[in-house]
Amino acid sequence: MQALILTDIEKLEYASCPKPGPEEDEVLVKVRASGICGSDMHAYVGHDSRRPPPLILGHEASGIAQIGGKSERVVIDPLVTCTQCWYCLNGHSNLCTSRQIVSMEPRPGTFAQWLAIPERNLMTVDDNLSFEQASLAEPLSTAWHGVKLAQEHSIRPLQSARILIYGGGAIGLASALALKYLGCDNIVMLETNSKRIDLLAQAIDIEVRNPSTDNTVHEADVILDAVGSSITRKNAIDSISPGGVLVHIGLGDAEYGFEPRKMTLAQITVVGSYTYTHDEFIEVVDIMSRGGFGKLDWHKNYALSEGPMVFKQLLDGQADAIKIILNPPDSE
Ligand SMILES: [Zn+2]
Ligand SMILES: [Zn+2]
C-alpha cells in the first residue's frame, strides 16, 4: 500500500510499504480521509518524543470496513483501550493504563491506504456526512471532552459564563462549536495568525481577536487553552475571574507559566483535558450527523501524495483551511 512516512525531522516520504495484517479482534479499514492534527505537526518538527521516526502519522480518519459481512462507511476512534482496567470500567477510557493511540508505537497511523484496528473502535457514519466531515469527529471529540470538563468544574452554568478560548485551530474552533451547541453565546477567541482569523470568520460567528495587535484584557469565568504554551497559561491565570476554570487542552510547550498565588487566592480550578472517552466519541458522531456542530465545512482536502508539500505549508502558517485532510488513493 501507499503511505506517508515520517523518516526524519521535517522529512516525509510518500512510499509503498506492506499492508497491515489484522490481529484476531481487528478489521481492516480502507482509509478515505485523514486529517492533519497539531500533534502530527509536533511530531513532524521533532517535538513529540512519543512519536519518533520512522513512523506513519495520522489518527483522525474515516473510511470503509467490512462489518458483519457488509461494507460500511466508518469513522475511527484512534484510542485503543483495554476495556478491563479501572479507568475503562469507570467511564474514563481515555486514561486506560494500557492505552494505545493510532500513530504512536506500536500502532501505525492513518496517513496510509489501510489501517488495522479493533472493530469496537469503529462507528458507522450516516450517508449525510462525507468522509472528510466524518474525520472531524476526532478533533470535535477532543474539544467536547474539554467543554464537558469545563461544565463539570465551573461554579456557574456555562451558558451564563464569559468564555475565552486560546487558539483558533481545529480544537479551538471545535470547542467554540461545542459551546454554541450547548447554548453558550459569550465567547471570545484569541488567535495570532491573521490568515487563520480570516478563515475563522467564515467558519463561525464569534468574536475573534488578535492579541498581538490588540491588548484588551478579557476577564473570563471559563478559559479553554487550545494552545498550551507558557504565555497562554500565564495570560489565562491573569484573565480568569475568582472561582474560574481553566481547561488546559493544548500541548504547546512544557514551560510552566502559572502564577500559583493567584490560583490559590482566587480559587481557580485548573483541569487538564486529554482526548475523549469512547462514549463521548459516539455522542459526538451522533451530534455531527444531526447537524449540531454546524456545516462542518472548515476543511480542505489534498491527495495523500501531496502530504510532504502540505506539511511544509502548515509549518509556514500558510494553511488555507482550519483543518487540512489527506485522501489516500482509492486503489487496492
Ligand atoms: Zn488529533
Ligand atoms: Zn483500560
Image (cartoon, grey):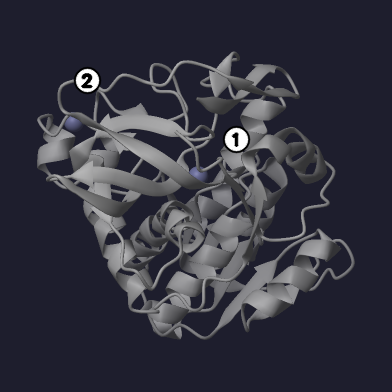
Which residue carries the number 1 mark? 40
Which residue carries the number 2 mark? 23
Which secondary structure, mark 2? Answer: loop
Query: Is 31 positioned to the left or the right of 307 in the image?
Result: left
Which residue appears at 58% of the width and 78% of the height? 187
Q: How many marks?
A: 2
From the top left corner, tell me how far across and down residue 178 is, in percent.
44, 71
From the top left corner, tell me how far across and down residue 321 is, in percent.
71, 61
Which residue appears at 38% of the width and 31% of the height? 115
Closer to the N terminus: mark 2 or mark 1?
2
Circle 1 Cα neighbour tier, 10 Å, few/some/many (<14 / 14–19 / ≥20): many
Q: Quadrant of residue 251?
A: top right
From the top left corner, tell me how far across and down residue 154 is, in percent.
37, 68
Near-viewer residue (163 or 111): 111
Which residue appears at 46% of the width and 64% of the height? 130
Q: Is mark 1 within 8 Å of ligand 1?
A: yes
Query: Is 59 positioned to the left or the right of 125 in the image?
Result: right
Q: Using the rendered image of the protein, determine whether residue 325 is visible from the camera's viewpoint.
A: yes
Q: Amino acid at mark 1?
A: Asp
Near-viewer residue (267 or 10): 10
Q: Quadrant of residue 255?
A: top right
Above or below, comparing residue 295 to residue 210 in the picture: below
